[in-house]
Amino acid sequence: MAGTLQWHSGAAVTARLFFVAGWRAHMALFRWMRPSAFIPTVLGVPLVQLIWFVHLGDYIDAHPVEYYAIGNALHACAVVGLFAPAMSVQGERFGGTLTAVLASPARREVMFLGRVLPAVLFGALTSAVMLSLGTVLADVRIEPGQIPALAATLVVTAVSCSACGLVIGAIGLRTREALIAGNLVSYFMLLVSGINVPQSNLPGWLALCGDVLPMSHGIQAARDVLAGVPGVGGLLLLELAKAAGYLLVALLMLRALERSSRRHAILDEV
């Protein structure tokens, strides 16, 4: 019976569930109702990371500082992309409202995908701010003609990262360790996704892990765009394919774990 009302209530209700309910759930469950929580979390942490790795890279002198600035600027979307979708599921559980949410007749895919959209927007915005700061900290040069391709790269990378965050959120239906999983994925991406260490320098199995995780192809596409290398469409398509795969896995996990949690009566266990 879940989702029956949305099939027959028209596009307006579905759109409202996707956009309005998704936005409000994102803002409330990710603790962003006030700017005092938004700025230190979403901008402060990536800024400290950007400054640290730019100066570390300048000291080591293994690659140009622009390499570290671009990689860490795009990784900034992980703060929102991984943790906001995760909290949109696990936050309901901690707040004791998950049973009420899952008892509604709303279509699950519309309800949960709507909570990913704000993460994509804020993630791309955060990366854009960090790239702008990279022009000051690391002399990253952005030509006006590169902005459309760069903007598309930021959005695609944020979509891939947010889709992975929804997989982490699905894990939160059964465990209390979803946020720990998000941290592990975020730090692992720093190692294997080409952010600070070229994937060509990694063992084959680690480079393969980086190719499977979000943002590796998006980061390479951003570097190619800023270097004036044409034809980044293939890299963006690969990143979108990863995003589609993560979304499919997340929705299947949410469905399977919801049924299992109902069967064992553990939906509200914290």
Image: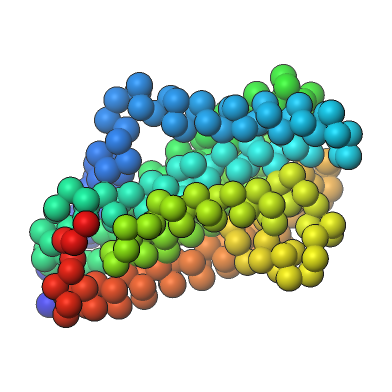
Name the residue located 24 percent from the left edge and 78 percent from the top edge.
Answer: 260
Residue 208 falls in which quadrant of the image? bottom right
Q: Nearer the viewer, residue 206 or 233?
A: 206
Q: Position of residue 174 (x, y in %)?
A: 29, 67
In the rendered image of this protein, does residue 150 appear above or below residue 246?
above
Q: Nearer the viewer, residue 251 or 6?
A: 251
In the rendered image of this protein, does residue 197 appear above or below residue 33?
below
Specify whether residue 162 is in view. Answer: no
In the rendered image of this protein, does residue 213 appear above or below residue 94?
below
Residue 235 falls in which quadrant of the image? bottom right
Name the residue located 74 percent from the left edge and 44 percent from the top edge.
Answer: 196
For the N terminus, give its image quadrant. bottom left
Q: Nearer the viewer, residue 29 or 122?
A: 29
103 lies left or right of 59: left
2 lies left or right of 54: left
Name the residue located 32 percent from the left edge and 33 percent from the top edge.
Answer: 32
For the C terminus, give its image quadrant. bottom left
Q: Position of residue 136 (x, y in %)?
A: 72, 19
35 lies left or right of 12: right
Q: Nearer the viewer, residue 1 or 36?
A: 36
238 lies left or right of 60: left
Specify whether residue 105 is in view. Answer: yes
Q: Position of residue 9 (x, y in %)?
A: 13, 64
Name the residue located 32 percent from the left edge and 63 percent from the top edge.
Answer: 175
Q: Position of residue 239 (x, y in %)?
A: 62, 60
